[in-house]
């Protein structure tokens, strides 16, 4: 019998601590992310803002086009 198994009669495995998946070793920790330069966070916020603004602009354009198409059908 393997050493991983208990000596109990039921043969259940011995409790072992949970191990993190191997991919977790590639991910930076939260304190490491918070320690980044504030300029990075400002640029990230501006970039996300521009993406959101672009989405709203695109949505407004498509909705206006759809409304115009609907008006011409009437």
Image (cartoon, helix red, strand yellow):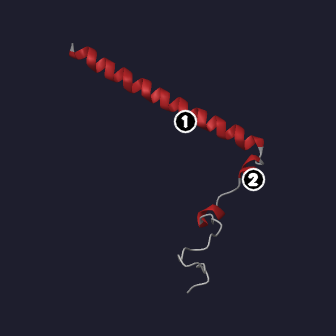
Pointer 2 local density, CA inside 10 Å: few below 14, some 14–19, many at least 20: few
The label shown at residue 51 is 1
Q: Are marks 2 and 1 in contact (CB under 8 Å)?
A: no
Labels 2 and 1: the sequence-earlier one: 2
Instruction: From the top left corner, tell me how far across and down residue 68 is, in percent.
Output: 31, 18
- Residue appearing at x 54%, y 32% in the figure: 52
Instruction: Assign a secondary structure to mark 2.
Output: helix
Q: Nearer the viewer, residue 49 or 29?
A: 29
The residue identified by callout 2 is 32
In the image: residue 63, left or right of residue 53: left
Identify whether 72 is placed above or below 61.
above
* Quarter of the rendering containing residue 2: bottom right
In the image: residue 45, left or right of residue 73: right
Instruction: From the top left corner, tell me how far across and down residue 4 is, in percent.
Output: 60, 79
In the image: residue 54, left or right of residue 67: right
Identify whether 15 is placed above or below 47.
below
In the image: residue 74, left or right of residue 64: left
Identify whether 38 is placed above or below 13.
above
Q: Nearer the viewer, residue 63 or 6?
A: 6
Image quadrant holding the C terminus, namely: top left
- Residue appearing at x 62%, y 63% in the figure: 20
**Hey, which residue is sitting farthest front in the picture?**
9
- Residue appearing at x 71%, y 55% in the figure: 29
Instruction: Assign a secondary structure to mark 1.
Output: helix
Query: How much space separates mark 2 and mark 1, taking CA atoms?
Result: 26 Å
């Amino acid at each position: 019998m393997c050493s991983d198994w208990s000596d109990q009669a039921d043969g259940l495995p011995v409790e072992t601590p949970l191990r993190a998946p191997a991919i977790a070793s590639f991910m930076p920790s939260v304190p490491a992310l918070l320690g980044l330069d504030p300029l990075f966070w400002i640029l990230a916020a501006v970039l996300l803002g521009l993406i959101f603004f672009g989405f709203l602009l695109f949505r407004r354009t498509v909705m206006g086009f759809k409304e115009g198409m609907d008006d011409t059908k009437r």
